[in-house]
Amino acid sequence: MNLPSQFVQRVTSQLGAEVDALFDALHEPPPVSLRIHTGKFEGSLPLDSVPWANDGYYLNHRPVFTLDPLFHAGCYYVQEASSMFLEQAVRQVGATEQPLKVLDLCAAPGGKTTHLMSLLHRESLLVSNEVIRSRAWILVENVIKKSGTNTIVTNNDPIDFGVLGATFDLMVVDAPCSGEGLFRKNRDSINEWSPENLNLCSQRQRRILTDALPSLKVEGYLIYSTCTFNPEENEEVVRWLITEHGYELVDLEFDEAWGFTEVNIMGSAACQAFPHRVRGEGFFLAVLRKMQPSKAVPQVKLVEKKRRPKKRSRARCGSCEPEIAKPVQHSFEKVTRRKSKEFEPWLNMEGEWLQFVARGDRAYAFTKSHVEQLLLLEERLKIITVGLPVGEWKKHGFVAAHGLVLSELFNEEVFPSQNLTVKDALRYLRREPIETSLPDGVGVVAYEGHRLGWVKQIGSRSNNWYPSEWRIRMPLPEVEPWSILREE
Ligand code: SAM
């Protein structure tokens, strides 16, 4: 590995004699880790746990995750271990115990968002945003696979949040950065590294924060993180938040044995993971508390979206992926009981905490207590998907969404289902034709009891309804591939 000389100089002055241990670690293969989505996958694994994340595990090798049907069923998310440290911050600010409004501002591909979906109080609202359109679709895929009813995925610039004014109790800004902490995982980040780029990153981080922070309430918490060791993007940004914006740095308590380093900034500590001290990649995290209103709320002239009448939309993609179509110019509205009668039995809904909402022809199940907030947010934000996609009204009736079958709320008693062999499961996930013994009509296919998606059986033919954009594109192996089910 050829490290840039200016990088070598800087980390040497940062770490002193210890720097050789860092360089040695950078030549080691990166640890492989994942986070189980409990509810979808029960039981613990016979693997080393990530000590700072309840559902995190280390694998002993890097398997081909794409060839594990459970990966596609949303049973787990492959995530770098150090970044799971977010869990410590979320727990310590009390966000697991009370319903909060949370914004994950730089969210794609969705590691922190899916972690937040697991951690936050069930009645919380999570707005998960990604500014880059193509990356926002990857975020949607991961959010739908994780499955929940209280998440809104948006595709907005940070300033669009700033103009909302004080809205969120907690904001996570996992900022785009120079990526020093990922040098051994992503060799491109070495080639892209330069002092100029680093400076641009630090300016961009400040701009993102300045634009979005007016939407954090006073006394609300900001979790700021990066995957770099560089003080300009870490300590200096935190110092700037304290001195220029009146934020208070909050000390986190954690076990010293985990290897995270306390970075003292004006008397309080942020946390840094170095790969030679922690079993994970480079990562930085600080928790700050907003102590005074933002100085300037961005004044962007908003073009108010007109709430259009209920017109049936024609802008859609294939019948099998209703929930991942391009957002249409419709407004969300509550679905009446009369209209939802048809699909209500498809969900196990205990109590009255869910509300069906629709945009155009698509219906979603959403946490009832946040429906009014959703209607307000959609006036200002580009919402791509909300809550749990349930299905779509089509010419011939209501067609269930892929997201529904992946949900823990799915009522398994309504549709017939069949477990597939691993070979057929992978062929299904490649969107190839498969044979089933399901009766005619819409049915569910699963692997070892974990639902993969829908098929429509017509006589001896089984139409594969797996979303084409998510299909496996790689060839299938001759031998049985790795699965988390067989991890030992
Ligand atoms: N939080 C994500 C996760 O855990 O999977 C990783 C986020 S990544 C470190 C930073 C994200 O910020 C990227 O998805 C990138 O597209 C986005 N980004 C890039 N420029 C941005 C900008 N100017 N404003 C907001 N987000 C930006």
Image: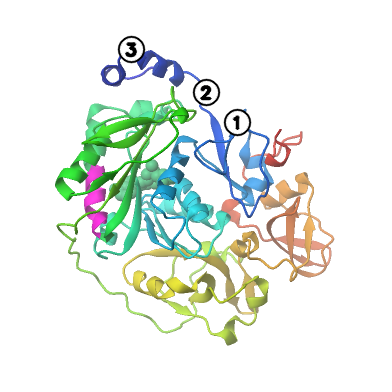
- Residue located beneath label 2 in the image: 29
Instruction: Decide which of tag 2 and tag 1 comes sooner along the chain.
Output: 2
Q: Is residue 213 magenta?
A: yes
Q: Amino acid at mark 3?
A: Ala
- Between the C-alphas of marks 3 and 2, the distance is 22 Å
| Marking on residue 75 | none
Q: Amino acid at mark 2?
A: Pro
> Quick check: 181 above or below 45?
above
Q: Secondary structure at mark 1?
A: loop
Visual colour scheme: rainbow
Q: Secondary structure at mark 3?
A: helix
Residue at the spot 46% in from the left edge and 55% down from the top edge: 96
Secondary structure mainly formed by the magenta segment: helix
| Marking on residue 17 | 3
Residue 238, quarter of picture: top left
Q: Which residues are magenta?
A: 204-214
> Quick check: 430 above or below 276?
below
Q: Are marks 2 and 1 in contact (CB under 8 Å)?
A: yes
Q: Is residue 18 left or right of residue 278?
A: left
- Between the C-alphas of marks 3 and 1, the distance is 32 Å
- Between the C-alphas of marks 2 and 1, the distance is 10 Å
Where in the figure is residue 375, as x and y percent of width and height? 39, 74
